[in-house]
Amino acid sequence: MKIALLADIHSNLEALSACLDHARREGAEGHAFLGDMVGYGADPRAVLDLVMEHAARGALVVRGNHDDAALEEAGDEGMNLAAKRAAAWTREVLLPVHRTFLAALPFHIRHEGLYLVHGSASAPEKHVYVTDARAASASLARSGGASWVFCGHVHEPALYYTVGGARPLPFKPVPGVAIPVPTRRQWLAIAGSTGQPRDGNTAACYAMLDPDRAVLTFHRVPYDWETAARKILAAGLPERLAVRLRRGE
């Protein structure tokens, strides 16, 4: 069963819809959402409605730091001013059903060889960034021996894999190119950001795992970022957040 893995949607309905449509065409039968469904963007309710629909059909969903911030002001500690303003606005517009859904989400999930977390398995509730091999090693070590660890938080696609007992090695994924990920090794994949890519490419990110064939593919999906940016400005959110979508940064 192919599983589409989406992270850091950040209230970007246009990007989420484009990725879900692409994943359906690619044969996705399951979905996993790796945290930060909200924050930054202008469509938190619509995005959560879609995620909740998928969760009701069995999708796996974990909680991210911007989801924390959407529940209480203390959750935005350490965020920059634009992120805090977006979090405060999100808290105002979410409905009780959305807050209840976010509050019930786990910080990590183990499921049939998968370990899902927003940041790092080393401290799921602290949302630690995995930005290098050392951090990847710490996450893999706390994953309970999972074959495939998937996370987000970093906003750029990345892949690490184990070789013997050495520190994990990085691998640069190429969009659309299938990567063998056999279970004789451990793999840590950062899916990239669906709703706010930061690698200079405006196209949305997601990853697709075929566990039966042990194959992983990273995808980039063009979407209507102009509409998403206009919505941010119309909502009175910081202009910087719209600019990031236009520049993919």
Image (cartoon, grey):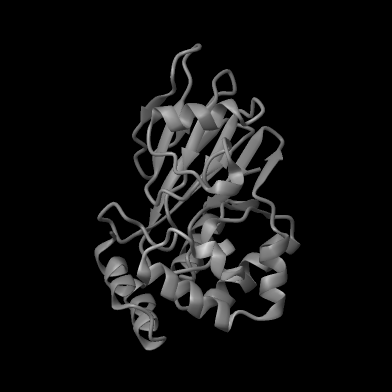
Tell me what residue is drawn at x 63 percent, y 38 percent: 115
Tell me what residue is drawn at x 65 percent, y 51 percent: 30
Q: Quadrant of residue 202?
A: bottom left
Q: Nearer the viewer, residue 100 or 116?
A: 100
Say which quadrant the N terminus sits in: top right
- Please count the marks in the image: 0
Question: Could you tell me residue 191's position as x and y percent?
Answer: 46, 46
Q: Nearer the viewer, residue 123 or 163?
A: 123
Tell me what residue is drawn at x 41 percent, y 48 percent: 154
- Residue 140 visible here: yes
Q: Judge from the rendering whether residue 25 lies leftward or rightward of residue 159; answer left or right.
A: right
Residue 68 drawn above or below residue 132: below
- Residue 41 visible here: no
Question: Could you tell me residue 117's position as x and y percent?
Answer: 59, 45
Question: Could you tell me residue 173's position as x and y percent?
Answer: 37, 37
Tell me what residue is drawn at x 46 percent, y 50 percent: 153
Question: Could you tell me residue 82's position as x and y percent?
Answer: 36, 71
Say which quadrant the C terminus sits in: bottom left
Q: Judge from the rendering whether residue 155 lies leftward or rightward of residue 1; answer left or right.
A: left
Q: Nearer the viewer, residue 244 or 227?
A: 244
Residue 231 drawn above or below residue 104: below
Residue 1 drawn above or below residue 30: above
